[in-house]
Amino acid sequence: MPLYLDIHHLVEGVTAEQIEEAHEKDLAVQKKYGVKYLRYWYDVTSGRAFCLMEAPSKEAATAVHREAHGLLADEIFEVTEGV
Amino acid sequence: MPLYLDIHHLVEGVTAEQIEEAHEKDLAVQKKYGVKYLRYWYDVTSGRAFCLMEAPSKEAATAVHREAHGLLADEIFEVTEGV
């Protein structure tokens, strides 16, 4: 299954709690789209969040965020993990 | 130890082999700066590479790339891993 890394440019002032809450919503709907969130990281100072996921397509990955909370990623890349 | 995620905007046409070779050079010098590369991902189509590392500071993380191969990250974020 393809691996994707997406980048969210969130608003300044976003809190860790808000990001974690959004992620919980992603987890709640991911199965419907065949997506599996693997890990995520965030930096509240710059308002960035990064999600690593397996998904059948970029569109499926986007669909999860759209249904879960509407906070779509600003960028998404199909990535290979280096060894 | 702080956790950092950096983003490289590489040239189009960069190959997986070139990225993996650069990463090997990072691994070879990381200890000198107290840095520990954890994982990395790349997308040759868009020329992006992402490195996840533990480092004592942003400057230490940058110093590894500078000494190893000179390909500095375009962006670096101190991140928290979500649970």
Image (cartoon, coloured by chain):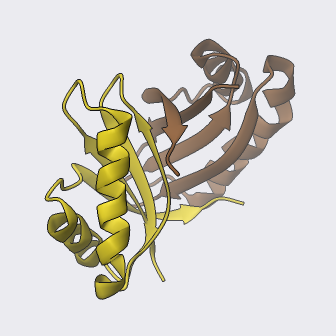
Chain colours: A brown, B yellow
Residue A22's x, y, as percent?
68, 42
Is residue B70 visible in this depiction of the protein? yes
Say which residue appears at 30% left-offset and 31% top-offset. B47
Q: Is residue B63 above or below residue B15?
A: below
Say which residue appears at 71% left-offset and 25% top-offset. A1
Is residue A12 visible in this depiction of the protein? no
Q: Is residue B39 above or below residue B34?
A: above
Taking the image as shown, residue B33 lies to the left or right of residue A83, namely left
Residue B73's x, y, as percent?
24, 53
Residue B17's x, y, as percent?
35, 40
Q: Of residues B59 and A45, which is closer to you in this image?
A: B59
Q: Quadrant of residue A54?
A: top right
Say which residue appears at 35% left-offset and 57% top-offset. B23
Residue A18's x, y, as percent?
63, 51
Q: Quadrant of residue B26?
A: bottom left
Quadrant assignment for the C terminus of chain B = bottom right
Say which residue appears at 61% left-offset and 20% top-offset. A62
Q: Of residues B25 and B8, which is closer to you in this image?
A: B25
Taking the image as shown, residue A33 lies to the left or right of residue A78, namely right
Q: Is residue B44 above or below residue A12?
A: above
Total numbered circles: 0
Q: Of residues A47 and B14, which is closer to you in this image?
A: B14
Taking the image as shown, residue B34 lies to the left or right of residue B73, namely right
Q: Is residue B75 above or below residue B3?
A: above
Q: Of residues B76 and A16, which is closer to you in this image?
A: B76
Q: Quadrant of residue B9?
A: top left
